[in-house]
Image (tube, rainbow, N blue to C red):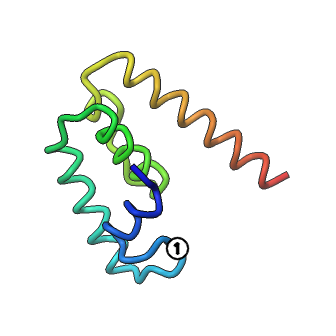
């Protein structure tokens, strides 16, 4: 999944800062529905990661049945926090 394509699909733009608040809310809701319906592990993880970046991801035990997927999500969260901390410094 290409991140820019997914952002365009759900928010109408690849630049989240340019998206109207209504578009953000609607896109997040659509992503949450799609996450609940998605059975492909990779696509499911990509949707969860985008939701995480928007501050709207469900808890790991709800999003992922597999411990391996939950561990991958924790690693993603750790890496994204480090990346955010590096930008602040």
Picture residue at 14% right of the left edge, 44% below the top: 37
Q: Residue furthest right?
A: 89
10 up-or-down from 72: above or below? below
Residue 83 placement: quadrant: top right
Residue at screen point 61% across, 42% down = 80
In the picture shown, does residue 55 fall above or below 78?
below
Badge 1: few (under 14), some or many (20 or more) residues near its Cα, within 10 Å?
Answer: few
27 lies left or right of 79? left
Label 1: which residue? 15
Q: Quadrant of residue 28?
A: bottom left
- Residue 36 % position (x, y): 17, 44
Residue ID at (39%, 79%): 21
Asked if residue 16 lies left or right of residue 37, the reply is right
- The front one of 83 and 42 is 42
**Percent position (x, y) of residue 87?**
77, 54
- Residue 3 coordinates in the image, percent (x, y): 46, 56
The image quarter in which residue 5 lies: bottom left
Question: What is the total number of numbered labels drawn onto the structure image?
Answer: 1
Percent of width and height locating residue 73: 45, 31
Residue at figure coordinates x 49%, y 53% from the top left: 53
Residue projecting furthest to the left: 37
Secondary structure beneath dot 1 equals loop
Question: Where 15 sits versus 29, above or below?
Answer: below
């Amino acid at each position: 999944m290409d991140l820019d394509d997914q952002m365009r699909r759900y928010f109408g733009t690849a630049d989240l800062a340019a998206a109207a608040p209504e578009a953000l809310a609607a896109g997040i809701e659509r992503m949450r529905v799609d996450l609940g319906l998605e059975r492909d592990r990779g696509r499911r993880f990509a949707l969860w990661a985008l939701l995480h970046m928007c501050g709207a991801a469900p808890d790991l035990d709800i999003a992922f049945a597999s411990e391996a997927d939950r561990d991958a999500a924790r690693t993603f969260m750790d890496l994204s926090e480090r990346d955010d901390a590096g930008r602040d410094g």
